[in-house]
Amino acid sequence: MSLWFHLDFCSYSQHMEGCRVYSLNAEDGMGVISLSVIYGAIILSSMFLPPIMIKNLGCKWTIVLSMGCYVAYSFGNLAPGWPSLMTTSAILGMGGSPLWSAKCTYLTISGNKRGQKINKKGQDIINQYFGIFFFIFQSSAVWGNLMSSLIFGQDTSIEVPEENLQFCGATSCVENFTVANSTLPARHLVNTLLGSYIGVGVLAIIFVAVFLDNIDRDLAREFRKTKGNKSFCSTFLATFKLLRDPRLLLLIPLTMYSGFEQSFLAGEYTKNYVTCAIGIHYVGFVMICFGASNSLCSFAFGRLAQYTGRIALFCLAAVTNLGCFLGLLYWKPHPDQLGVFFVFPALWGMADAVWQTQTNALYGILFAKDKEAAFANYRMWESLGFVIAFAYSTFICLSTKIYVALAVLALTMVTYLYVEYNEYKHPTPQVTTDDLHKPEKADFKELNDKYIISQTKL
């Protein structure tokens, strides 16, 4: 699992760097448009790339290739401008969906194989693996944001004028924030941070390429040897074919809400509360709090799920987010309330730990036979949530954004609970290796399913 730390230290650094692009490249809306391009490209790549890349290259080399796209984004920010930023944003987006789909597929295969080996249900091991993964993944926020905060903290000229505080909080509208966001760190400090991200990203690629097990190498080799154009087209369109499953359609609000809530914290909270009231150099420290809470809760929830069930955890996350949104509606941020700036990300991290670990695990359990296409759909709809949130970011007031997020949260819980009810009435059947011994079904899909042992319960 330590290898995943190197992989996702890079990934998370880039994700949080997107938030910094939001603030650092605010001129003419370049930062917001950059983020929209990233997630728009992720949506496009989710439609076609993950299944075909994973089946042809295997999870390991899909991850390596996609990580290179993330590093390219840091290079683009060394000389930010419309051509460089838009180009590297598109490159990052095209690699984003294959990276996360390959990672989820890798963990699902590993969890099912481990469950078969120790004679345990695959879903319990998958939950644990996603919990461990997100524990390491979110802990990278501590180190990445500590790095950025220490670097930006060297600029002692960053100050927030008292008169700008009136524009902070839920009363903030777009036209007001241009005044409040006028204090930026020196360019050489930004380049130092980007150089650090590039170094970590290159190191991550080397570690994954050298040490990560090529868990599905034989399957990828078999696919390349035996499959013709018909299979290629079928795999290429697998993401869309899975949309015929009503369970996936009902999970779309849940998946999109994941994008809404992450974009709100990384964009709106850091901009309209933290940067506006106490300065951009505090963003890293606030997100360290989020990452630490998210990391610890991811590990805990990954193990608790087998005892409490998914429903209790999802309800906990929904109630936590509801309380945070209501609190942000009425809180007027001020530098004298420094501790409060850390309370919201800590609670948000706890809720996000549920949304990330349990939603990913739920996809792996419900769609075990079509995991590549399922996780591609997950990334596509989550990215659509990001795109929508960033698209209206510059047009509506913060209070309206909170009401929109609350409406999506309500819809999310209704559709999710219906999926759980349907799963309770019609449980996903167990799939074992015995199904592969039927000659009439001995094609590549059945060969791939030899790794699947799963049984779903509440």
Image: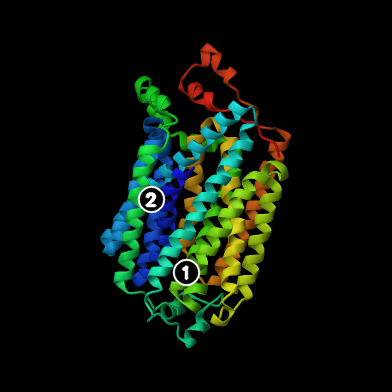
In the image, taking residue 241 as reference, residue 455 lies left or right, namely: right
Residue placed most toward the observer, 399 or 70: 70
Residue 360 visible within the image: no
Q: Which residue is mark 1?
A: 283
Q: Closer to the camera: disc 2 or disc 1?
A: 1
Q: Which residue is mark 2?
A: 93
Whole-percent x, y for residue 210 in the image: 35, 38
Residue 181 position within the rendered picture, expressed as x and y whole percent measured from the top left: 42, 77
Viewer can see residue 446: yes
Instruction: Tell me if label 2 and label 1 are in contact, CB under 8 Å.
Output: no
Q: Counting residues from the N terminus, which is met first, the one under dot 2 or under dot 1?
A: 2
Q: Is residue 39 above or below residue 430?
A: below
Q: Amino acid at mark 2?
A: Gly
Q: Which mark is residue 15?
A: none
Q: Secondary structure at mark 1?
A: helix
Q: Where does residue 127 sit, x and y in percent of width and height?
A: 60, 41
At a point 72% along the width and 43% down the height, the residue shown is 307
Q: Is residue 187 left or right of residue 453?
A: left
Q: Position of residue 442 (x, y in %)?
A: 49, 16
Q: Secondary structure at mark 2?
A: helix
Indicate the quadrant where residue 251 lies: top right
Q: Amino acid at mark 1?
A: Val
**Local crowd size for mark 2, using a 10 Å CA cut-off: few (<14), some (14–19), many (≥20):** many
Q: Is residue 159 left or right of residue 121?
A: left
Instruction: From the viewer's side, name the closer residue of 339 and 419.
Output: 339
Location of residue 112 by image quarter: top right
- Quadrant in which the C terminus appears: top right
Q: Residues within 10 Å of mark 1 (few under 14, many from 20)?
A: many
309 is higher (above) or lower (below) than 140: above
The figure's colour scheme reads rainbow
